[in-house]
Amino acid sequence: MTAPGRWDTRRVDASMSLLTDMATNPVDPAYAEAASRRAASGNARPSRIMTAVVGLVAVVLGAATVWAGRELRAPEPAVLQARALLEAEIEQRTADVQALQEENADLSAEIDALSAELSGGDADVLTGYLTTGAVAGTVAVSGPGLVVTLTDSARAASGAEDAADERVQDIDLQIVTNGLWASGAEAIAINGQRLTALSAIRSAGEAVLVDLTPLVSPYRVEAVGDPDTLETNFARTAASGHLTLLRETYAIGTQVASSEDLLLPASPVPTLRYATPTGPDALATTGADVSGSDRTPGESS
């Protein structure tokens, strides 16, 4: 009997031939042959010319990308022309508004002079007229008071697109003015625009309108009254907390300061739509209200 394996010529590790080949010949023969041919021809490394060509192509592609990006971001000539036209129109309308305000001031002064002349020097009549005019906002007033200033954040002032919440809005001015009225203010003006019972604070886009007059930051809210009383009472209102919220959350600048000499201009005389002015005797007898109301006759308060 022949000994087991005596005539068996196979390698002992024949079953591991794949692992053996991978260990002894890690490079595929085809790759090895290609590398040998490249080394024999002297092209084992890229030539300097090829490197320069690749670098030049990269530079050209980078410059073309930058140029295309700038062209896409550049505004169209039509947009620039429309913006210039709009800016010119805004400047013209602002000048017209200023001229009309000056004319209104002259007319108000003339009305005051004529009213004093008609009163015949009667101090009581003149005092009553001035008091009523001061309350209605049709007479310029001066005196000590409180000044609240609100300013857009630095990001909003620089024109950042994501800083819309960091601009002073109409609701902010409404809250501040309501807080000042509740604190005992006798007269209020925002950037020289006198507030009356018919005044409206609204927004149009990014602009804040007070009686249809556009205002820009900073917004200076002036209130005539006793400075100490106004400051103490204002600190207890919700408006004071709102200013803190604007300052700490939206980076909007806020400042509250007293002043010893404020001058608030008169507003144009309002047009009465339903009320009819009557004589002082009739007012004392009937108690009629001539402040001008939007309610139609017959509506209850």
Image (cartoon, rainbow, N blue to C red):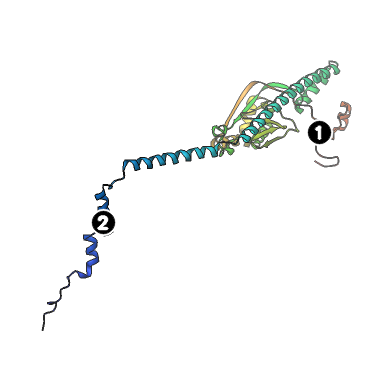
Would you place residue 243 above or below residue 128 in this image? below
Q: Quadrant of the N terminus?
A: bottom left
Left or right: 56 with respect to 42?
A: right
Q: Residue at x 28, y 58 (%)?
A: 30
Residue 7 screen position, x and y as percent: 13, 77
User: What is the three-letter code of the residue carrying label 1?
Assistant: Gly
Q: Quadrant of residue 146?
A: top right
CA gap, disc 1 and disc 2: 103 Å
Give the structural element (helix, strand or loop) at label 2.
Answer: helix
What residue is pinned by disc 1?
A: 292
Q: Residue at x 25, y 66 (%)?
A: 18
Circle 2 is placed at which residue position?
A: 33
Q: Position of residue 86 (x, y in %)?
A: 67, 32
Q: Secondary structure at mark 1?
A: loop
User: Position of 229 compared to 116: left or right?
Assistant: left
Q: How many marks?
A: 2
Q: Residue at x 22, y 68 (%)?
A: 16
In this rendering, would 252 be left or right of 104? left
Which one is in front, 134 or 234? Answer: 134
